[in-house]
Amino acid sequence: MNDMAATVPLSDPIQADDATLAASENDGQNEVTAPGSRRFELLQKNIRRLTGRAIADFDMIRDGDVIMACMSGGADSYTMLDTLRYLQSVAPVKFEIIAVNLDQKQPGFPEHILPEYFERIGVRYRIVEEDTYSIVKDKIAPGKTTCSLCSRLRRGILYRVAKELGATKIALGHHRDDILHTFMLNMFYGGKIKTMPPKLIADDGENVVIRPLAYVREPDIKKYAAAMQFPIIPCNLCGSQPNLQRQAMREMLNEWEKTNPLWIKSMFTAMGNIAPSHMLDRSLFDFTHFTPGQGKEASGDTLFDRDDKLGQDQTVINLL
């Protein structure tokens, strides 16, 4: 087991799970989650616990790693950096963090904010200045979404910088909701069962990308960022139109969560609980060369045979 599993003990007596946080919120819906309050303590410990758990589950960080934390100035990246620095202080493994921001020369970008923040907290950092904004505006027609080209340019620059810094891992701030939205996008628009993995080999074939916040909910990140008063930089400076397909997935999942929060938890759990023999992908399971009586007994077909829904007392899914 990765030593990071011991970073935030899962048996911590004041760790918070979703139910605990929800109860806390119901008790004080109009309260602001302020540092030092019980609600803030629960929120912070939950984020740290889930981050430590994701790092351990996917072997994201090892002794001697140099982590390049990509900082956009949004709530996600601030929360990721803050949590990684905490884990760095308590983990049984030693690793280095270098915060990196790519200044793409968008008009109105407050270029002083991140360097001042990095200086204040005492983290090693690098600001990379590349005018990708002009390239994107030259190539993409007005009113069209620029995110795809901008993302490709940004990735190429960050991969290069990672090599220059000697970084062994590139950390991105994507969270549980990003993973769910991407899963739905691929299924509805791409015809694939695929999402953002918590850890992968980058498309340059050389860098390793990790997503330490993979288990953390977006609403919790936003509440934490607000409580910590991180100097957030708006993400719409480029003037790009929003990704309407991703926004549609966001709205749909938000409605589902209002109807039954367990649907979202179950969907997220399902991505780590795949039975290739009960899907249709012939590249993952050989439907031609197997015979009855060989291998494990088939499982999964009987779950809903007697009823098309689960009773309230049935515990069949290990939810986060």
Image (cartoon, grey):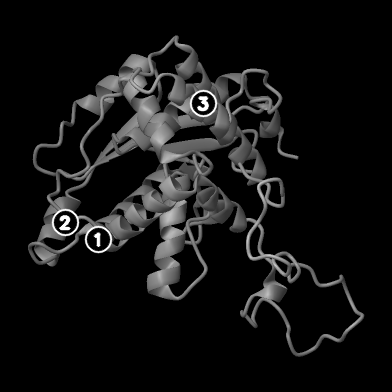
> Please, what secondary structure does the residue beneath circle 2 have?
loop
Judge by depth and name the residue closer to the eye, 89 or 294. Answer: 294
Q: For the residues marked 1 and 2, what is the alpha-carbon distance in whole angstroms?
A: 8 Å
Residue that badge 3 annotates: 23
Give me the residue at 35% from left, 53% from top: 250
Q: Position of residue 14 (x, y in %)?
A: 62, 18
> Please, what secondary structure does the residue beneath circle 3 have?
helix
Q: Quadrant of the N terminus?
A: top right
- Asked whether disc 1 touches disc 2, contact meaning CB atoms under 8 Å apart, the reply is yes
Q: Using residue 160 as the reference point, say whether residue 243 is left or right of it.
A: left
Residue that badge 2 annotates: 241
Q: Is 4 drawn above or below residue 190 in the view shown? A: above
Q: Using residue 136 as the reference point, say whether residue 97 is left or right of it.
A: right
Which residue lies most toward the right here?
Answer: 293
Q: Position of residue 107 (x, y in %)?
A: 9, 42
Residue that badge 1 annotates: 244
Q: Position of residue 177 (x, y in %)?
A: 43, 48
Q: Residues within 10 Å of mark 2 (few under 14, many from 20)?
A: few
The amino acid on which the numbered mark 2 sits, given as a three-letter code, is Gln
Q: Is 268 drawn above or below residue 103 in the view shown? A: below
Q: Quadrant of the C terminus?
A: top right
Asked whether the viewer can see residue 37, the reply is yes
Q: Residues within 10 Å of mark 3 (few under 14, many from 20)?
A: few
The first of marks 3 and 1 along the sequence is 3
Judge by depth and name the residue closer to the eye, 320 or 240. Answer: 320
Q: Position of residue 166 (x, y in %)?
A: 48, 41
The amino acid on which the numbered mark 1 sits, given as a three-letter code, is Leu
- Asked whether disc 3 touches disc 1, contact meaning CB atoms under 8 Å apart, the reply is no
Q: Is 255 drawn above or below residue 94 in the view shown? A: below
Task: Report which quarter residue 112 is drawn in.
Answer: top left
